[in-house]
Amino acid sequence: MKLFWLIVAGGCAAVAGVSLLRGDFDSAFVVAAAGMLAWFINYRMQVKEKLAARDAAQEENIEENELDEDQ
């Protein structure tokens, strides 16, 4: 899914560039804003996955420490 959002962001950047060359500044702004939104969604998904992995590792460490203390 991350690759999808990167492709959308890149496509929006290309379309915004073409709109700028044609002099259609309103469309260029709207498409560029949509591209930035797609990039932000991609970035958010990556951070969310990293945080979930870190939380899972912390939970495993806590469980291991509790088992060690019980013995």
Image (cartoon, grey):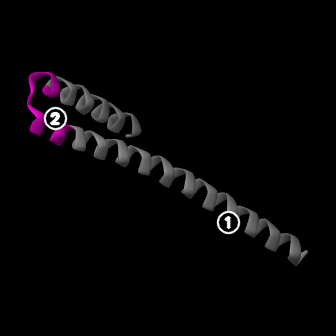
Q: Report the span colored magenta.
A: 19-31
Asked whether, in this view, residue 58 is left or right of residue 14, the answer is right
Mark drawn on residue 33:
none
Q: Tag 2: residue type?
A: Ala
Give residue 70's position: percent from left, percent from top.
87, 77
Q: Is residue 59 above or below residue 14?
A: below
Cα distance in 3D space between marks 1 and 2: 46 Å
The residue beneath circle 2 is 28
Asked whether, in this view, residue 46 is left or right of residue 57, the answer is left
In this view, the residue farthest toward the bottom is: 70
Mark drawn on residue 59:
1
Element assignment for label 2 = helix
Give residue 27's position: percent from left, percent from top.
11, 37
Element assignment for label 1 = helix
* Upstream in sequence: badge 1 or badge 2: 2
**Residue at horizontal 9 percent and vertical 23 percent from the top:** 22
